[in-house]
Amino acid sequence: MALSSFVLNTHPFSFRVSTDIEQIVESVKLLYGDAVELDSRISLPSYEIKIKHTSVARKLFKPQSQFFCDQREPFLPMPIDKCLAMFEWGLNWVVSAHEFRHVILHSAVLAKGDKAVLFPAPPGSGKSTLTSWLSHNGWRLLSDEMALMTPNTTQITPFVRPICLKNNAIALAKEWFPDGRFSHISPNTHKGDVIHLSPPQASWHERFNTAEVVAIVYPQYSTSTFCDIYELTKAEAFSTLTTNAFNYGVLGGTGFTTLTNLVEKCQTFEVKYNNLEELQSFLENDVL
Amino acid sequence: MMSSNSLPITEEAIVRALQDPNSCIGKCDAWWFSFIKILRFERLLSLFAFRCEELDLLVTFPMVVQGHLKNALIMAQRQADHLKYEVSLLSDSIKTVTPQCLYLKGAAYCLANMTVSKGRLFSDIDVLVPKECLDKIEKSLLFKGWLSKPINDYDERYYREWAHEIPPLVQSRRGTVVDIHHNLVPPISGKAPDIEAFLSQTMHVNGVTVLKPHAMLLHSCIHLIFNETFKQAHRDLYDISSIIKDYGNSTFWDEVIRLAKETGFYKELFLGCRYSSKKLGYELPPKLISDVPYTSAKLMLLDLVMLKALSPHHPLCKVPGRGVANFLAWARGHWCKMPLMLLIYHLSIKSGRALAQSILGKHFFDAEGTPK
């Protein structure tokens, strides 16, 4: 198959993507909707991305995909059935390897109006399940994985992209959102089975509007706990935040002042929960 | 990887843009898209950004370009800040073993706060220590979290027996890489100088020891010319030009020519300066130009090969005949570095590997060199 090429117009970064993998074209169109511009007005995208079969020979035998950012190939090739996961993680790599104008946190961000809550958490804490739930229940998604903070403010710039759900969360989300736009499953990645879910239209519509962080909530899904809420000290919140920062090291002093300023201006909680409605009601009644 | 609708840019346009960033005002978006990719690949993006910022030009460029240039400036500043911290820790460890701890190249330019360091990224910290102290230093750094990257047995032997440095050490928490040298070129080449000649040409600045500028220039030329791959060599031409511009008075040239002749690197000095000045368009002093260490036929042949090999290597910068030139330059580089029998052995191992990779995919071998 010949190369297809399009511009992925995700605010605030855009990507010129070329690929010879049919599944990438289909899935990206499904997940990104209008942000995929086949005949783009953008003549100067931020980055050039290519994801393609490794070679003609390997197309027939255990086909693999490889990811390039211009000439750089940051990852080893992956089996073709994981190509969408590779594409998504590739975009994350491109942004975190090149962008230093924002303090980037490994965190979900959701907002009502312009009031945002940060949900920083390590993989396996149920962050993306929470993200998908809230974004389908009256909140707008700014990001599932990368919170872009303007240095020395509490402002978050949205970077709306698909939500990455893993393992058990896949069946749950398909049951909750029967009309959701889901990708194919990328099976057996290093994070297990993963699927990507497009956020609802409201999030896409507001993807150019910044929001101000009012709270940081560290979520931890726990089957045996209904909904326990702990207030964190500023020092605890700060040190947990630094372990979830992508480019904290590169930004040095700016990263430090941004994060200390942030925890001082925000409410900071840790929640253990198995009931999403209860957590949502806490967020809407006591946090915002 | 070439994109079908990408605009090629000539080497002349790239050189002109770096020397006079004003020439970029009003360029079309397709030009910028190619230009940014080429500069990033050649590790020249932050140098361009630095020069534009000095001229207050950033605001005249498209927003996306401003973004890339600001990112590059932040990255370069961060490297410079971080270097001072790493070097203070490194020096502490090395000085428990030996007082001789000489920083080289990018790290040295930056520590001495030289113009050449402005907007110059470096991928590792180069330091030179006495050969007999290598083992002890490696062990003392190991305790501070500096570990060897996994490499295969052949490469390990290459480093330990034939090279002028030990395999790179990576700081396991911060990812910083340090290259520990005991000479400036591999002893196996038979050209390794008596390192004392360089050690007598050092200066102390901001708490560290670095080469004096004329010895830095010679080392930069050796690094550029005494090499088999020129993939990212274009940037070195700018280093040479910057050192000459800042320090190149009459005494400087006398000293560098004397040191080059004494250590057997006059050819490298001559060629390094020749190609930097030819490519970037500046004058060299007659005492260097008139003292040609080659016959005119051989110099013509070298020019033919090297002027192409030292061009930017990004595929969007078209250089006719570059493939052949790169091969010849590569062969010459190996020829200079190794005795013939060893060269044949080295190339047969490397090309056997390359052949296997071209058939089975380039990731067929893992880092230790075992087939997966």
Image: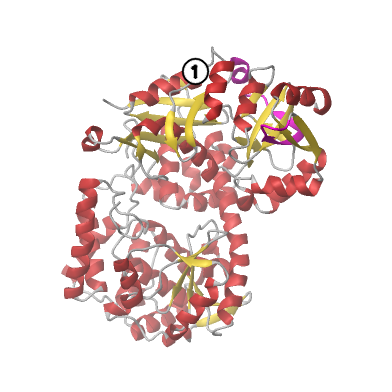
List the single residue furthest toward the front.
Answer: A224
Chain letter, disc 1 residue: A
Residue B322 coordinates in the image, percent (x, y): 24, 51
> In this image, B102 relative to A220: left or right?
left
Foreground residue among A69 and B233 = A69
Residue A168 coordinates in the image, percent (x, y): 54, 28
| Residue B304 appearing in the image | no
| Residue B99 appearing in the image | yes
Residue at 54% over, 13% down: A178
Residue at 40% over, 33% down: A82
Residue A285 sits in which quadrant? top right
Residue A120 coordinates in the image, percent (x, y): 67, 38
> In this image, B132 relative to B73: left or right?
left
Residue B197 coordinates in the image, percent (x, y): 42, 86
Quadrant where the image shows the C terminus of chain A: top right
Quadrant where the image shows the N terminus of chain A: top left
Residue A116 sits in which quadrant? top right
Give the total of numbered labels.
1
**Mark 1 surroundings within 10 Å by alpha-carbon count, few (fewer than 14), some (14 through 19), many (20 or more):** some
Q: Magenta residues?
A: A201-225
For disc 1, the marked residue is A33
Q: Is residue B258 located in the magenta-colored stretch of the structure?
A: no
Protein image colouring: secondary structure
Residue at 54% over, 37% down: B61
Badge 1 amino acid = Gly
> In this image, B116 relative to A58: left or right?
right
Q: Secondary structure at mark 1?
A: helix
